[in-house]
Amino acid sequence: MQQAILWAAGGTGFTFLMTTLGAALVFFFRKHVQMTVQRIFLGFAAGVMIAASVWSLLVPAIEEAEAAGGIGWIPAAGGFILGIVFLMLMDGLLPHLHNDAPHPEGLSSSWKRTTLLVTAVTLHNIPEGMAVGLSFALAAQHGGDPGLYTAAMALAIGIGIQNFPEGAAIALPLRHEGLPAWKAFLFGSLSGVVEPIFGILVVLIAGFIQPLMPWMLSFAAGAMLYVVVEELIPEAHLGEHSHPGTLGVMGGFLVMMILDVALG
């Protein structure tokens, strides 16, 4: 358990660091990222998360269930649906505002616009932290299987890579909203702090309910894919030309697939 916690802390710490480095771009640029570049980044993040949901979460969930003598698709489908429902509830309840959206979503609140912008990104970082933490917990449950540990590392690297532009995507709009650069950087960085929190939390939970690991893995997959379909892909294709966003999705999927196969 302790080793799994340390690995999860390291993996999600890396993803948090990448968010922080992305947010640091606010000290070099004062304006929004060019729309074409932003579409590529959003598409890339979507591609990474799609591939990670399949290879790093759903496939292991099915394999774990079948190894335990169960029917693989039941926990995979059940957990997947629960993950979607969880994110839908959070989307409907937690006040948040997506960049360039005219009105906030969730319950009405008196929160400032900047707070609502940060909340939107923070909410969607939760399943990413869960995914990395669960991957390391799975490796620990298999006696520190080197293959599973390298697969978890591949997932952390993939999520970290797409977190870099994500950090910039929150800090730069906050700067554009009129916040000082240091405050925009701080908020952009802190939007990723939920990843180590939830990553370590799921490791602790997984240690007590090991038989439910297939459900937890597929839960994280469902939550991640909800974010992809609900937010990332639509935003990646805003505007007349969709090729940059499309190629970004393909590129992200390819990178995550190569990482998972090469290191897994």
Image: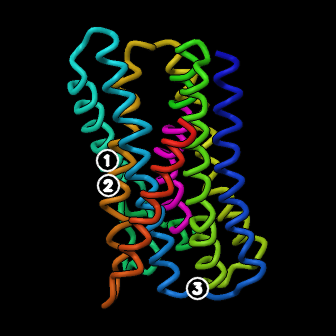
Task: Tell which residue pokes out farthest to the top in this image.
Answer: 69
Q: How packed is label 1: few (under 14 Cα within 10 Å), some, or many (20 or more)?
A: few
Q: Quick check: 152 above or below 107?
A: above
* Residue at x 57%, y 39% (from the top left corner): 263
Give the image location of residue 27, x and y in percent.
78, 78
- The secondary structure type at the circle numbered 2 is helix
Q: Disc 2 versus disc 1: distance between alpha carbons?
A: 5 Å
Residue 45: horizontal and vertical position, in percent? Answer: 47, 62
The answer to whether residue 38 is above or below residue 78 is: below
Check contact, mark 2 vs mark 1: CB within 8 A.
yes
User: Residue 232 is drawn in which quadrant?
Assistant: bottom left
Relative image position of residue 209 (x, y in whole percent): 44, 14
Judging by the rendered image, the residue that carries numbered circle 2 is 92
Amino acid at dot 2: Gly
Numbered label attached to residue 89: 1
The Cα atoms of the two marked residues, 3 and 1, are separated by 30 Å
Q: Residue at x 50, y 50 (%)?
A: 258
Left or right, 214 with respect to 168, comes to left
From the image, tell me which residue sits under label 3.
Answer: 32
Query: On the rendered image, what quadrant is the N terminus found in?
Result: top right
Q: Nearer the viewer, mark 3 or mark 1?
A: 3
